[in-house]
Image (tube, rainbow, N blue to C red):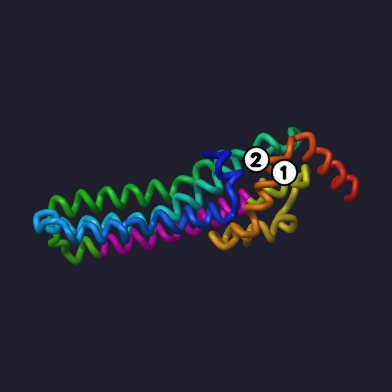
């Protein structure tokens, strides 16, 4: 999976992110032709559809960043120490939260049926806003860390934010930034470590 993301073209990653969430639209045309007994559970389809529409792009965003960071990790120079624990935690935290909310929502509706009271709705709105805030913080940090890894591998030296500002904003503008950042990732993934090291030495000599 990691190698596939590293070697995938920008248009392939873009289509993957925006094609999967809209599969339920295709399924919808078939569900309308089913029996009334199945249509009685039609609401469940829309709950699942909204879940896929919102969660799949988020999952793919973090999976894409994970693949880049872990895939390029072996090409980071040995003399540069980078701590990965915080990244590993924050890259999956929003997805776990969203999955937990979705599962609890399905269980709740199955128990109470469609008679969802106002308290439940208010609770879900509050939790959703909290998740959006947490997700935003995680996205900023994950984008920062991934762009730092990309520039570190490219230059083969320690870098600060001024070096990878363009990469950071490109990742934050996901998925449109894919068209800018993915070709660079393809080149870094295909180059041998010794080739990158030579490039890094040349860059260091220029400093």
In percent of width and height, residue 140 lies at: 56, 57
Left or right: residue 200 versus residue 94 is right
Residue pictured at 61% horizontal, 39% vertical:
71
Q: Earlier in the sequence, mark 1 or mark 2?
A: 2
Asked if residue 137 is among those painted magenta in the image, a careful observer would answer: yes
Residue pictured at 58% horizontal, 39% vertical:
3
Residue 96 - label? none
Residue pictured at 74% horizontal, 35% vertical:
193
In percent of width and height, residue 68 lies at: 60, 44
Tell me: residue 18, above or below residue 192.
below
Q: Find disc 2 in the rendering and name its residue.
A: 72
Left or right: residue 197 versus residue 57 is right
In percent of width and height, residue 16 lies at: 48, 53
In percent of width and height, residue 50 lies at: 32, 60
Asked if residue 114 is among those painted magenta in the image, a careful observer would answer: no
- What is the magenta segment's predominant secondary structure? helix
Mark 1 packing: few (<14 Cα in 10 Å), some, or many (20+)?
many
Q: Nearer the viewer, residue 131 or 199?
A: 199
Q: Nearer the viewer, residue 184 or 109?
A: 184
Q: Secondary structure at mark 2?
A: helix
Do tag 1 and tag 2 residues touch (Cβ < 8 Å)? Answer: yes
Q: Secondary structure at mark 1?
A: helix
Q: CA distance from mark 1 to mark 2?
A: 7 Å
Choose top left, top right, bottom left or bottom right for residue 156: top right
Mark 2 packing: few (<14 Cα in 10 Å), some, or many (20+)?
many
Q: Find disc 1 in the rendering and name its residue.
A: 153
The segment highlighted magenta reads 122-146
- Count of marks overlaid on the render: 2
């Amino acid at each position: 999976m990691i190698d596939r993301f590293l070697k995938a073209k920008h248009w392939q990653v873009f289509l993957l992110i925006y094609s999967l969430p809209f599969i339920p639209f295709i399924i919808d045309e078939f569900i309308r032709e089913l029996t009334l007994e199945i249509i009685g559970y039609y609401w469940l389809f829309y709950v699942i559809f909204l879940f896929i529409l919102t969660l799949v792009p988020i999952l793919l965003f973090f999976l894409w960043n994970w693949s880049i960071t872990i895939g390029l990790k072996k090409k980071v120079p040995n003399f540069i120490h980078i701590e990965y624990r915080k990244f590993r935690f924050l890259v999956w935290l929003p997805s776990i939260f969203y999955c937990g909310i979705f599962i609890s929502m399905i269980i709740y509706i199955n128990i109470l049926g469609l008679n969802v009271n106002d308290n439940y709705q208010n609770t879900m709105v509050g939790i959703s806003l909290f998740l959006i805030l947490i997700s935003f913080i995680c996205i900023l940090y994950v984008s920062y860390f991934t762009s730092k890894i990309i520039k570190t591998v490219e230059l083969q030296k320690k870098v600060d934010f001024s070096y990878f500002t363009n990469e950071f904003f490109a990742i934050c503008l996901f998925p449109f930034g894919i068209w800018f950042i993915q070709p660079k990732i393809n080149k870094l993934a295909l180059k041998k470590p010794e080739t990158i090291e030579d490039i890094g030495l040349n860059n260091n000599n220029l400093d």
